[in-house]
Image (cartoon, coloured by chain):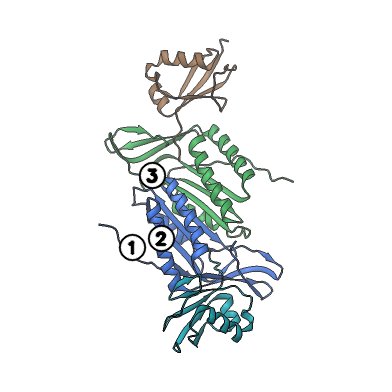
Chain colours: A cyan, B brown, C green, D blue
Amino acid sequence: MSQTIQIKAFGMIAEKIGSSDLSLDNPGTLKELRAQLESQFPDLVGVKFSFALNKKMQLADSEIPAGAEVALLPPFSGG
Amino acid sequence: MSQTIQIKAFGMIAEKIGSSDLSLDNPGTLKELRAQLESQFPDLVGVKFSFALNKKMQLADSEIPAGAEVALLPPFSGG
Amino acid sequence: MEKERKPKNIFVQGPISPEKIAQSIANHSSKTDIGGHSIFLGQIRADEKPEGNVIAIDYTAYEDMALEKAFEIREDIFEKYPLTCMHIYHSLGEIKVGEICLFVFTSSKHRKAAMQACDELVERIKAELPVWGREILDTEGHVWKVNT
Amino acid sequence: MEKERKPKNIFVQGPISPEKIAQSIANHSSKTDIGGHSIFLGQIRADEKPEGNVIAIDYTAYEDMALEKAFEIREDIFEKYPLTCMHIYHSLGEIKVGEICLFVFTSSKHRKAAMQACDELVERIKAELPVWGREILDTEGHVWKVNT
């Protein structure tokens, strides 16, 4: 499980991270990814965001497949 | 009650009467007016229409005031 | 002081052009408290009847009464929903299939009020305005339109 | 044979012009089975925030995911309502107050289906499409738009 994953950040999350694209070692699950992101970017602590794996929303914790495109999605505000 | 009233007919009713404007002696009430119109224009028998008195719909029988503008209104079909 | 509203003419001779609709939308760009517009357009359908196919509808109205009633409906809807603007246009005369004969336009700070008001306006216009459509057929006959 | 539908691009750079809306309406005049069109337009509001007044919204999206989701929503709505046509356009980039950022357009034989489908589409677009609005303030700061 030490492959690299591609992370895309959007909206307020991209702003807090300071970038819209990141490459990280795959931490295994979304829960572990969230913990790692919060540790690396303390501004994310307490900020609401969801994950999409390969363009599908993930509402519960999930394993992150090898080579996945992981998106960090703050609450939508289109329209 | 022998004044003249002005009658305006619309849509299918004007077509059946053959005119959109009529002057009649006031028959007193809308019920009597309907009977008189059906007698004068047999094509109106069985045809659905309502009355307006001075531009207000009259759903029940009413007296026809002197000099009233009486409109014969088939079911509306705007839009 | 309450805003005073007066009866406006809602009738236009002939079809309502897409350009008129665009102009009406553009006129609202200076009203920066509007967040949503809801629009309903009625278009003449080429219905097939036992007597022939509809090629146009010729609209007539009891205009004075219709304008009074339209004003009453406008006042009711303005009272019921927090609207910024409301516009109603209905065609008179012959409108061909594919052309627009009704244009109802509501605007509000938030979308829900605009949408609900627009729906209610269309229902009331169809049910309460003394307007009649004579459907002209390709057989040179006609039938009187019936609203469902 | 069922009609096959493919994902379409719903995004346009910059505001949606009234002329584009007029053109879209005019394009439907040849579809003579349409009796009613329902349109919703989202317009940028000059909201006052504690941090300043909104002068524009800068929209960004996760475009690939949004187009997949928009396609799924389209299919759901086509299955649920007897529609003739459905069009969705959403702006990206900076849209100034008073300009149009969302254009949803449904057409049907009868008005009810067009209206209900339009309402439902707007709700789903706002709730389900990965799109974000950054509200630009006259104080040179910004706040992130929150949908209610």
Outermost residue, left direction? Answer: D1
Which numbered disc flags the more N-terminal residue, 2 or 1? Answer: 1
Cα distance, mark 3 to mark 2? 25 Å
* Badge 2 vs badge 1, beta-carbon distance below 8 Å: yes
Q: Give the number of callouts.
A: 3
Instruction: Tell me the residue at 61%/60% (across/down).
Output: C30
Query: In this rendering, which labeled residue sits more in front, label 1 or label 3?
Result: 1
Which residue matches tag 2?
Answer: D74
Q: Position of residue D63 (x, y in %)?
A: 45, 73
Instruction: Tell me the residue at 33%/37% (across/down).
Output: C136
Query: Residue C27, can we see it?
Result: no
In the image, what residue type sits under mark 3?
Ile
Quarter of the C terminus of chain D within the rendering: bottom right
Classify mark 2: helix, strand or loop: helix
Residue C134 shown left or right of residue C11 in the figure? left
Q: Where is residue C40 in the image (x, y as percent from the top left)?
A: 48, 49
Classify mark 3: helix, strand or loop: loop
Which residue matches tag 1?
Answer: D5
Query: Residue D29, can we see it?
Result: yes
In the image, what residue type sits under mark 2?
Arg
Q: Nearer the viewer, residue B77 or A9?
A: A9
Q: Residue C44 carries which label?
A: 3
